[in-house]
Image (cartoon, rainbow, N blue to C red):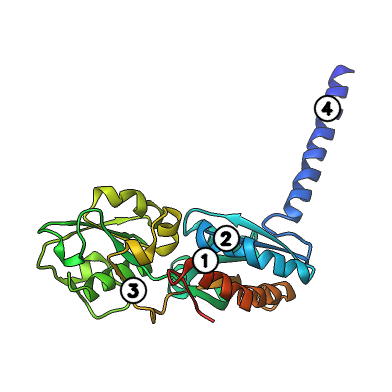
Amino acid sequence: MKAKKLLTLTAVAVLSLGLVACGGNKDAGKTSGDDKTIVVGATPNPHAEILNDVVKPLLEKDGYKLEVKVFNDYVLPNKGLTEKSLDANFYQHSPYLDEYNKKNNTDLTYTVKVHLEPMGVYSDKVKKVNDVKDGALVAVPNDPTNESRALKLLAKEGLIKVADKEILTKNDITENPKNIVVKELAAEQLPTALKDVDLDVINSNYALEAKLNPLKDAIATEAKDSPYSNILAVRSDNKDDEKIKALSKAITSPEVKKYIEDNYKGAIIPSF
């Protein structure tokens, strides 16, 4: 009798687990089913600031709720977008997205360009890029597109010469008269490395987060006509959704343009 009762309880438990699993899989990997809720992944500064301070209230007027999920790296927001835990993300430029798609066999795209964050060279040791000593240690981002940007910026400043190609690594340095040593680091680690290197080439979003002002603190910056404008990334299957259209409109609104110009004072430049 006890054995029969035990078998019955076991069967019920298995069935219950099966129902839970089915229920979990139904919504696995999906964003909110509410067409009025928009989930966006962003790095903290300036992306999440722009979304929370300006875009969110604009969308509320149109009947949408914006949820901003903050990330501190350049990989997880694209994974979240691919896996559909995000409706969009806002932190990267299109060359980075193109490289990510190529490397991961994904088909992410974008709707609008929002702003340019000129990359800067920072130093606690010298006032000019070419003042570094022989054998100087130089930190750059380790992802392909941003390392390319960094090396091209150092070449523009006359420190090195590089191969004539789009994607560069330290192996593409063709002339290195000061024998600089290039240290490749994750972009988010670069601000903390500043005290340990001679030159530090930092993306503006991480510079701002570390209380570095690209206009005042950088000893060299990219030209304002740089092609690396930050974009609103989406999936091909939701690009034409009404809520994505509403988000794209809000993030390129006159209110956002004014906010960028007033708050970042040239350290970040609107691209619309």
Quarter of the image containing the C terminus? bottom right
Mark 3 sits on what residue? Answer: 222
Percent x, y for residue 145?
37, 69
* Of the pair 264 and 5, the residue shown nearer to us: 264
Mark 1 sits on what residue? Answer: 263
Q: Nearer the viewer, mark 2 or mark 4?
A: 2
Precedes in sequence: disc 3 or disc 2: 2
Q: Is the residue under label 2 in contact with that under label 1 (CB below 8 Å)?
A: yes
Mark 2 sits on what residue? Answer: 49
Element carrying mark 1:
helix
Percent x, y for residue 167?
32, 73
Q: Is the residue under label 4 in contact with that under label 3 (CB below 8 Å)?
A: no
Measured in 3D between alpha carbons, the distance from the residue under mark 1 to the one under mark 2, in whole angstroms, is 10 Å
Measured in 3D between alpha carbons, the distance from the residue under mark 3 to the one under mark 2, in whole angstroms, is 23 Å
Q: Residue at x 50, y 79 (%)?
A: 271
- In the rendered view, tell whether residue 176 sits above or below residue 254: above
Mark 3 Cα-neighbour bin, 10 Å: few <14, some 14–19, many ≥20: some
Q: Nearer the viewer, mark 3 or mark 4?
A: 3
* Of the pair 107 and 162, the residue shown nearer to us: 162
Precedes in sequence: disc 4 or disc 1: 4
Q: Residue furthest right?
A: 1
Amino acid under label 2? Glu
Precedes in sequence: disc 1 or disc 3: 3
* Of the pair 87 and 246, the residue shown nearer to us: 246
